[in-house]
Amino acid sequence: MISAQKEDIHLAIEEELIKREGEIGEKLHTARSRNDQIALDERLYLREEISEITDLISIFQGTLLGVAEKNLKVIMPGYTHLQYAQPIFFSHHLLAYFWMLQRDKERFRDCYGRANVMPLGTGALAGTSLPIDREYVAKLLNFPKISENSLDTVSDRDYIMEFLSDVSLLMMHLSRLSEDIILWSSPLFSFIEISDTFATGSSIMP
């Protein structure tokens, strides 16, 4: 929790670093600006989040494959506008979501590549006059490369917007699947049953 007494997020991060690492944390600004420091924080955060998200997607894809394999010959009605259209394999329907999630995962991996660039040393906008080794810092922080242009590095956040776009697409696909599950478990369809462990009802309605 960040105290409201802190001047801004930059100061809060600096104080937390000093608290964790001691006096050496006070050298945070050597050859660095708050601009490239916050860019680093954002990129480190996105690397961690994207890795976690792609791992979870892979696990869920495995679950979908497992259910599909157990129901290879199950036939269900396919709908258009909630009207009977064509017969379809249940497994085929589930695999549609597998491939949606596969594209989502690929988008996140692409985003990871663009976020996984070391920004430190670019300073406020035009670098630093101190003799630093950006490649060495990148190696310490497990970045495969350093940013090419200092002004671009500290002034643009397209990788964050790309991440948010990827998240919105992922949630749209999960929302579609969730709506299918809601329909399939309703009395009008009765294709599946959901355990009470995972479902709740209204306080007054069924």
Image: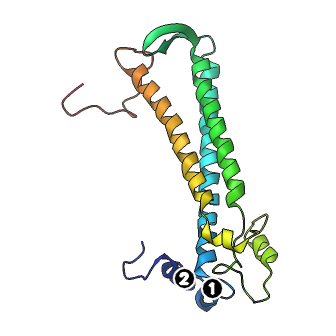
Q: Residue at label 2?
A: 14
Q: Quadrant of the C terminus?
A: top left
Amino acid under label 2? Glu
Residue at the image point whose x is 60% and y is 16% from the top: 71
- Disc 2 vs disc 1: Cβ atoms closer than 8 Å? yes
Judge whether 78 appears above or below 52 on screen. Answer: above
Residue at the image point whose x is 63% and y is 15% from the top: 72
Q: Quadrant of the N terminus?
A: bottom left
Q: Residue at label 1?
A: 28
Amino acid under label 1? Leu
Secondary element at image label 2: helix
* Left or right: 159 as drawn, with respect to 202: right
Figure quadrant of residue 114: bottom right
Point out residue 11 in the picture as x, y percentages from the top left corner: 50, 82
Point out residue 145 in the picture as x, y percentages from the top left corner: 79, 66
Judge whether 129 appears above or below 91 on screen. Answer: below
The answer to which of marks 2 and 1 sits earlier in the sequence is 2
Residue at the image point whose x is 66% and y is 37% from the top: 103
